[in-house]
Amino acid sequence: MNENAEQGLKFFNLRKYYEAHECFETAWRETQDTSREFYRALLQLSAGFYRLTQNRPSAARKFFTHALKWLKQFPDHHRGFALDELRSWTEMLIRAIDDGKTTDDIISEHYQPIQKK
């Protein structure tokens, strides 16, 4: 995995979403193989959570929807990640927004670290 993507995962798992987004974006720009779109999905997820911290659920929903689009391009398991689970989680985040849950509740109840399986 790209060094910046690794750093992005560390930031995301520390709930430093803006910093994670920046690292994933750098990884996306630097990568030329198919993993590029995987990094794009991760940057969209981190941006979505960053928007949740700003109490902007509709903006977060857009980012999560874009992330889901990029994640659907990959098989259920990619580079050690269970993307089927990541896709289900992203769909659940979108539903939570659609159901009118508060951004604080979404973050506290539905945040999970992104880890290799």
Image (cartoon, rainbow, N blue to C red):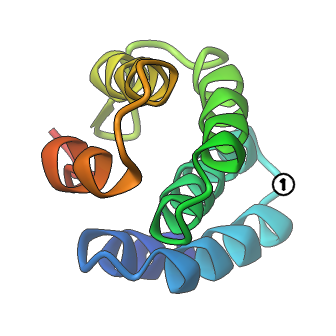
Q: Position of residue 34 (x, y in %)?
A: 73, 38
Q: Is residue 79 left or right of residue 31?
A: left
Figure check: 48 above or below 55:
above
Q: Is residue 14 left or right of residue 50?
A: left
Q: Which residue is mark 1?
A: 32
Query: In the figure, residue 16 lies in which quadrant?
Result: bottom left
Residue at 68 percent across and 43 percent down: it is 63
Secondary structure at badge 1 equals loop
* Residue 79 in sight in this render: yes
On-image quarter of the C terminus: top left
Q: Nearer the viewer, residue 92 or 74?
A: 92
Residue at 24 percent across and 48 percent down: it is 105
Residue at 31 percent across and 78 percent down: it is 10
Q: Position of residue 106 (x, y in %)?
A: 30, 45
Instruction: Identify residue type, mark 1.
Output: Gln
Residue at 37 percent across and 26 percent down: it is 96
Q: Position of residue 61 (x, y in %)?
A: 62, 36
Q: Is residue 84 left or right of residue 48?
A: left
Figure check: 85 above or below 22:
above
Q: Position of residue 35 (x, y in %)?
A: 65, 44
